[in-house]
Image (cartoon, rainbow, N blue to C red):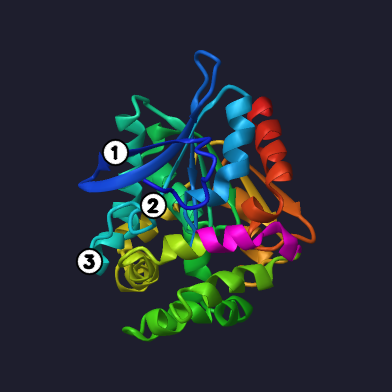
């Protein structure tokens, strides 16, 4: 089978049934015995390919590195119901994935929606996360506060207009899918501080992944489920307001047009051991734009802990 963005077949591709969903995973098996598992979780509207350089970096360091296509994306299963994209369900997918790979825990790395899932896995399944690395993804309770605690974060509300837009039926799919999803992928390139970080071939790889049957609707359903279920769950809000006791690194591209860096302020009140690192002149798309620096930051953090 052809895998978008992997013409060289450098990585190993396989499928695992997790939480009733078939997940397509890409992995590199490092050569060093006893090295921990590292799981890389992509964001919207991406797929495993966003992590290709980070995969290679930590493979060379001896880690077993796995990057799944999240539920609904690219070659993974695409449930129809919006309820199937609740944060709790997405987190249970990763809990199951770690166990199916034969591990008790992992170094969990997440960007954007993958970061939201990584935060959630650390809270819901703390024994599964030995170290947590978050890239441009707000802590769920900080995000909730920005919207629903008076006074709200008006700047963030404006930045997050698309979340409300995605609640509409069929119209988001119509507009984002126009031109075989080229406009959506090109929008990523327009928001990069360094547009050359995304080549024409990269754009085509993302476009092909989004053009898989039901992939675009499934990706948008993450946002639909967020407002309809997850963020209003009293149990989840209470859980995320507790102190997280997992060593955590938060990396933030400061030129993020969707998520303000003020969402990183005060994280020490929610996470007992947290380090926040900013990357200036870098957009929301850190794994695409600054993969080498990101990998070095993660490596330094892991060596210190």
Residues at circles 2 and 1 in contact by the CB criterion of under 8 Å:
no
Residue at 24% x, 49% y: name it. Answer: 21
Q: What's the magenta region?
A: 194-205
Q: Position of residue 133 (x, y in %)?
A: 57, 43
Q: What residue did someone put label 3 on?
A: 80
Residue at 31% x, 61% y: name it. Answer: 85
Confirm whether residue 193 shows in the render: yes
Q: Position of residue 134 (x, y in %)?
A: 57, 48
Q: Secondary structure at mark 1?
A: strand
Residue 60 left/right relative to 15: right
Separation (CA) of disc 2 from disc 1: 12 Å
Q: Earlier in the sequence, mark 3 or mark 1?
A: 1
Work out whether residue 259 or residue 35 is closer to the camera in this orientation and state it: 35
Confirm whether residue 273 shows in the render: no
Residues at circles 2 and 3 in contact by the CB criterion of under 8 Å:
no
Residue furthest to the right? 281
Is 204 within the magenta? yes
Q: Residues within 10 Å of mark 2 (few under 14, many from 20)?
A: many
Q: What main secondary structure does the magenta stretch of the protein show?
A: helix
Q: Secondary structure at mark 2?
A: loop
Q: Earlier in the sequence, mark 2 or mark 1?
A: 1
Residue at 36% x, 80% y: name it. Answer: 167
Q: What residue did someone put label 1 on?
A: 16
128 in relation to 192, above or below: above
Q: Residues within 10 Å of mark 3 (few under 14, many from 20)?
A: few
Q: What residue did someone put label 2 on?
A: 70
Separation (CA) of disc 2 from disc 3: 15 Å
Q: Residues within 10 Å of mark 1 (few under 14, many from 20)?
A: some
């Amino acid at each position: 089978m052809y895998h978008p963005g992997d013409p060289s077949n450098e990585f190993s591709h396989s499928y695992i049934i997790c939480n009733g969903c078939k997940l397509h995973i890409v992995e590199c098996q490092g050569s060093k015995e006893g090295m921990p598992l590292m799981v890389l979780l992509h964001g919207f509207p991406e797929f495993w390919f966003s992590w290709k350089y980070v995969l290679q970096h930590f493979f060379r360091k001896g880690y077993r590195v796995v990057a799944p296509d999240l539920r609904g994306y690219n070659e993974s299963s695409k449930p129809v119901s919006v309820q199937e994209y609740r944060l709790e369900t997405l987190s249970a997918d990763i809990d199951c994935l770690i166990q199916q790979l034969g591990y008790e825990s992992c170094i969990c790395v997440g960007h954007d929606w993958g970061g939201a899932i990584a935060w959630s896995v650390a809270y819901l399944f703390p024994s599964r996360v030995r170290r947590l690395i978050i890239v441009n993804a707000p802590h769920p309770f900080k995000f909730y506060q920005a919207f629903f605690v008076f006074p709200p974060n008006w700047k963030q509300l404006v930045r997050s207009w698309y979340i409300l837009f995605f609640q509409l039926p069929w119209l988001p799919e119509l507009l984002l899918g126009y031109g075989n999803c080229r406009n959506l992928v090109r929008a990523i390139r327009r928001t990069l501080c360094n547009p050359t970080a995304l080549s024409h071939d990269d754009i085509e790889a993302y476009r092909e992944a989004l053009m898989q049957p039901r992939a675009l609707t499934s990706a948008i359903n993450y946002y639909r489920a967020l407002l309809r279920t997850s963020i209003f769950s009293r149990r989840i809000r209470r859980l995320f307001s507790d102190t997280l006791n997992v060593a955590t690194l938060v990396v933030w591209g400061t030129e993020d047009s969707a998520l303000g860096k003020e969402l990183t302020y005060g994280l020490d009140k929610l996470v007992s051991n947290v380090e926040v690192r900013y990357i200036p002149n870098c957009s929301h798309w850190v794994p695409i734009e600054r993969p080498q620096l990101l990998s070095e930051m993660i490596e330094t953090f892991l060596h210190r802990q």
